Image (cartoon, coloured by chain):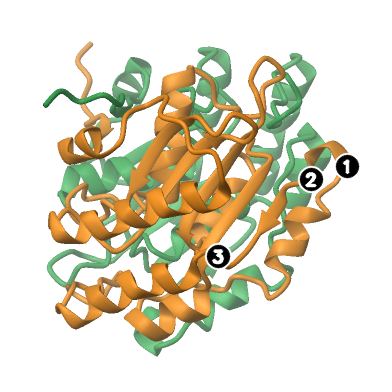
Chain colours: A orange, B green
């Protein structure tokens, strides 16, 4: 029997491997955020996608497990936001669907911009224990024109108060938001593609 | 420069290619739903994942573009719900992130169970014009113990009333829900894995 359907196969651009190595350590929240903003910025200058970067880190040690950048257009995949790429690559690296497995250290997602409705939805099943965000959805929408979808106003509290108590996800918002917004602005000013489903672009 | 990060690579199990061919036609909504429920059922009996099946179809012609089944555990990927697999495989097949592209016929997602928070979030960016669901989130939670996440009570109306008007997504709920629930029950009764992030299973 032959496989009649294509595999889903999405890879990070090669420049990411030159930019940051797996296992590299980042000691503060700001250091982690600076890295993911630099990924967003380089994703734009390399022409590989939208102005968004993310990473999965071990919370305590600060070790980078997986970076992610937006690859929607080059990857022909509406799922391929920076956060989703980071989740999937971290899970492939660790050979588990659950970054919250008992045999792993606590993991966090650090993302240059607050997750849109898709990425907010996905993080419920990812197993992360903490989320750190840069620019807010309002800032992203205002500065770029990208749609973030119906993210509920209490999105962070829903994660913080998730039941049972062991499933709580800590949220730290607005870290280096200005630096992240600067990348969003540069993308828009340079005429970066603001794709939307059904818009024909 | 070597690639230091794994690719994301998720394939449908081979039995799917034996079960249904790309391009096969399904003339009614019930025929499409019957197919995706049969995918859910066979996913359980083949031992490849949870009791969920989905498919992307051309709305008018009824042509199957891509099937999907739940591959979370075997794929080591929390994203790999049936709906997400169908989105990603359809987009890879058509070489576009946007199933709503102007050069494509209108596409729909038919899914054996109402999308959880992750899949509901993802469908905003997929480009589909219509969603057809079987079992409700309440039924899935009650019959299996899987968590569906904070899906808003007005989830269907938010899609139906999405702006601008050209972005509306039609929703048809509860098609062959009893048949879908029967698969959910069989999975639970057979001791099927009810995985949750952080639960250690």
Report if the CB atoms under discs 1 and 3 are less than 8 Å apart. no
Q: Residues within 10 Å of mark 3 (few under 14, many from 20)?
A: few
Would residue B81 be visible to someone looking at this image? no
Q: Nearer the viewer, residue B75 or A163?
A: A163
Q: Residues within 10 Å of mark 1 (few under 14, many from 20)?
A: few
B62 displayed left or right of A91:
left
Q: Are marks 1 and 3 on the same chain?
A: no
- Separation of residues labelled 1 and 2 (CA atoms): 6 Å
Q: Position of residue A74 (x, y in %)?
A: 17, 51
Q: Which one is in front, B164 or B78?
A: B78
Residue B145 is at least partly visible in this image? yes
Calculate the distance from the C-alpha at mark 1 to the C-alpha at mark 3.
36 Å
The local secondary structure at tag 3 comes to strand
Residue A143 vs A81, above or below: the answer is below
Q: Residue at x 60, y 27 (%)?
A: A98
Would residue A29 be found to the left or right of residue B198 on screen?
A: left
Callouts 2 and 3 in the same chain? no
Circle 3 residue: B172
Residue at 53 percent of width and 20 percent of height: A96
- Residue A138 x, y percent position in the rendering: 51, 80
**Depth-wise, is mark 2 or mark 3 nearer the camera?**
2
Q: Which residue is mark 1?
A: A165
**Pointer 2 with pointer 3, Cβ within 8 A:** no
Label 2: chain? A
- The chain letter under disc 1 is A
The image quarter containing residue A1 is top left
Q: How many marks?
A: 3
User: As rendered, which of A26 and B26 lies closer to the eye?
Assistant: A26
**In the depicted view, which residue is nearer to us: B100 or A197?**
A197
- Disc 1 + disc 2, Cβ < 8 Å: yes
Residue A196 has which mark?
A: none
Q: Which residue is mark 2?
A: A168
């Amino acid at each position: 029997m032959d496989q009649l359907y294509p595999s889903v196969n999405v890879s990070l651009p090669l420049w990411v491997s030159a930019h940051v190595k797996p296992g590299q350590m980042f000691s503060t929240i700001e250091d982690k955020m600076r890295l993911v903003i630099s990924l967003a910025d380089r994703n734009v200058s390399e022409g590989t996608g939208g102005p968004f970067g993310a990473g999965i880190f071990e919370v305590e040690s600060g070790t980078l497990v997986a970076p992610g950048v937006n690859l929607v257009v080059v990857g022909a995949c509406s799922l391929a936001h920076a956060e989703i790429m980071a989740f999937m690559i971290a899970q492939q690296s660790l050979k588990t669907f659950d970054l919250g497995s008992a045999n792993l250290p606590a993991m966090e997602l650090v993302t240059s911009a607050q997750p849109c409705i898709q990425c907010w939805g996905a993080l419920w099943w990812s197993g992360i224990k903490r989320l750190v965000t840069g620019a807010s959805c309002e800032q992203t929408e205002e500065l770029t024109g990208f749609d973030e979808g119906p993210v509920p106003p209490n999105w962070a509290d829903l994660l913080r108060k998730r039941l049972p108590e062991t499933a709580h996800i800590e949220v730290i918002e607005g870290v280096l938001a200005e630096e992240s917004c600067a990348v969003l602005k540069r993308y828009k000013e340079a005429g970066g593609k603001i794709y939307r489903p059904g818009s024909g672009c």
